[in-house]
Image (spheres, rainbow, N blue to C red):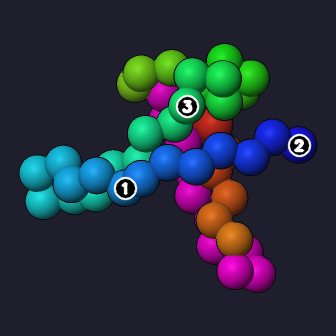
């Protein structure tokens, strides 16, 4: 298990999260991909749809 630290950034009226390249590569996440967020037991789970 790898651990990454990043910041939330304001994007217009929203807040965005930058995912490190190593994490995007590991999970084959690319610009424009749909993802799903789930709140579970105090954790945020992100899944590629």
Mark seen at residue 1 = 2
When the figure is inspected, residue 32 is found, relative to residue 7, above or below; the finding is above
Indicate left or right for 49 with 14 as reference.
right
Which residue in the rendered view is the most extreme toward the right? Answer: 1
> Viewer-proximal residue, 15 or 48?
15
Chain-order first, disc 2 or disc 1: 2
Chain-order first, disc 2 or disc 3: 2
When the figure is inspected, residue 3 is found, relative to residue 25, above or below; the finding is below
Q: Magenta segment, which residues? A: 33-42
Check disc 3 and report the residue beneath it. 20
- The residue shown at (43%, 39%) is 18
When the figure is inspected, residue 44 is found, relative to residue 34, above or below; the finding is below
Locate the C terminus by quadrant. Answer: top right
Is 40 magenta? The answer is: yes
- The residue shown at (88%, 43%) is 1
Question: Gap between marks 2 and 3, in whole Å?
Answer: 14 Å
Is 7 magenta? The answer is: no
Provide the secondary structure element on which disc 3 rests: loop
Q: Count all numbered tags in the image, as a single digit.
A: 3
Q: Are marks 2 and 3 in contact (CB under 8 Å)?
A: no
Provide the secondary structure element on which disc 2 rests: loop
Check disc 1 and report the residue beneath it. 8
Q: Position of residue 34 (x, y in %)?
A: 49, 35
Q: Are marks 3 and 1 in contact (CB under 8 Å)?
A: no
- The residue shown at (42%, 21%) is 31
Question: Gap between marks 2 and 1, in whole Å?
Answer: 22 Å
> Viewer-proximal residue, 15 or 1?
1
Majority secondary structure of the magenta segment? Answer: strand
């Amino acid at each position: 298990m790898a651990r990454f630290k990043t910041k939330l950034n304001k994007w217009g009226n929203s807040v965005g999260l930058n995912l490190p390249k190593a994490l995007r590569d590991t999970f084959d996440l690319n610009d424009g991909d749909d993802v799903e967020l789930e709140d579970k037991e105090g954790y945020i789970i992100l899944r590629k749809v």
